Amino acid sequence: MNALRELLTEIGHTTVNIVLAPDSYKDSLSSPDVCRIIAEAFRNVFSEASIASLPMADGGEGTLEATVRATGGSIRPTTATDPLGKPITARYGVLGDGLTGVIEMACASGLERLDSNQRNPVHTTSYGTGELIATALNEGLDDIIVAIGGSATVDGGTGMAQALGYRFLDDNEQILEQICTGETLGKISGIDASAIHPRLTKARIRVACDVENPLLGTNGAAQVFAPQKGANESQVDLLDKGLQNICSVWEKHGLDSSPDSTGAGAAGGLGAGLRAFCNASLVPGVKLVSEIVHLDEHIHKADIVTTGEGRTDWQTFSGKVCHGIAREAHNHNTPVILLSGTIRSERELLEKLAATYTATFSVNHELLTLNEALRATEEELYYTALNVARTLQLNL
């Protein structure tokens, strides 16, 4: 806090430039809502402050809205298939340049699309995500960003590929007629690319990854994420073997899977699948979003940066928004404040947070159930931000 005190002393009573760059508070507040609430609290204290609100995302929930909003683009409705193969109304975005499409996987193939008793990655598909990509290609968008956080699937992107015209063959060289799911991964022995979307080979596709996991092994898509999506122990083993199989098939057909690369295991192997089937490049989601919203330029002008997320734990330091914001703030020697819904109480983590952020604050102030905490978040966030602003004011 000493660095922040010295800075504010230098600023005196001139206009304070504040950048708000939070992630969403999952299941509670969107990142634009978080910006709105913090800005309202800060303006209550610093009425003349210049506040730049930059809702952020890391390739997960909110990436579509954050990038479209920052560029003055548009969000468009379309039809797609949900993780269980049912028709739904989904959406995709076009950035302000009119040339770049944004697909948020969760809009069609996300865990949020299913009730808790429907979640099982053995039976879910990324087909709807492929339909969204096809829609963007049909609109003439040859530069496409695919944000792949929040998936309900572990199908290695095979469902997505089917929607783009790929066909898969079994051991008898017969075409698999059903939509691919996690269960069908082990049945695939060949790939027919003769009917793929005509614009696919010309498209530039960038994948915004929200995790850094490889495709296979103890840190891979099945072992780490399948249980979170409803798989039991035997199903996790089935899915991991299925991913090993599709990786072998990719290699047989000369497709680039790079199973050990960062982000290959994101979204149940969709990261690797997009690379193999679409020649896509995998990029840390927070880096890609930061470039689109021109985060560097805003922080360069800032006196104070504020970021936040629903829960801060060790995952925060693995490609998540708040850690990306902290790194960028450090590059400019700008104080950065973390406002988190909850912060895991663990000494080593707290020490690392203290070394990373100028100050950290937990929004929830009493022991609550999850549902109670989610309902209270907006009010708690406002008053926490208000207290932060008043504390800063004491040093002016």
Image: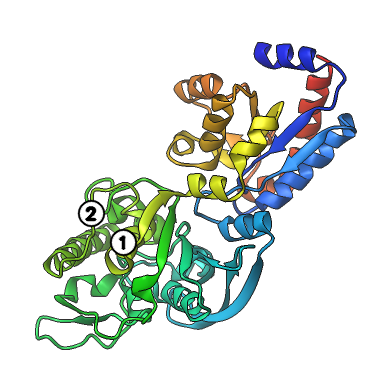
* In the displayed structure image, the side of residue 340 where residue 49 appears, left or right: right
Is the residue marked by circle 1 packed among few (<14), some (14-19), or many (20+) residues within 10 Å?
many
Asked where in the image residue 16 lies, by quadrant, the reply is top right
Residue marked by disc 2: 258
**Residue nearest the observer in this picture, 222 or 330:** 330
* In the displayed structure image, the side of residue 134 where residue 191 appears, left or right: left
Tell me the SS state at disc 1. Answer: helix
The structure residue drawn at horizontal position 38% and vertical position 65%, both measured from the top left corner, is 153
Tell me the SS state at disc 2. Answer: loop
**Residue nearest the observer in this picture, 232 or 327:** 327
* In the displayed structure image, the side of residue 28 where residue 272 appears, left or right: left
Q: Earlier in the sequence, mark 1 or mark 2?
A: 2
- The quarter of the image holding the N terminus is top right
Asked where in the image residue 238 lies, by quadrant, the reply is bottom left
Q: Is residue 344 visible?
A: no
Indicate the amino acid at tag 1. Arg
Residue marked by disc 1: 275
The structure residue drawn at horizontal position 63% and vertical position 74%, both measured from the top left corner, is 76
- Decide: marks 1, 2 in contact (CB < 8 A)? yes
Extreme residue toward the left, this view: 172
Instruction: Locate residue 350, reporting x and y percent.
Output: 52, 23
Instruction: Locate residue 257, reporting x and y percent.
Output: 23, 59
The structure residue drawn at horizontal position 37% and vertical position 71%, both measured from the top left corner, is 202
- The quarter of the image holding the C terminus is top right
Asked where in the image residue 364 lies, by quadrant, the reply is top right
* In the displayed structure image, the side of residue 294 where residue 262 appears, left or right: left
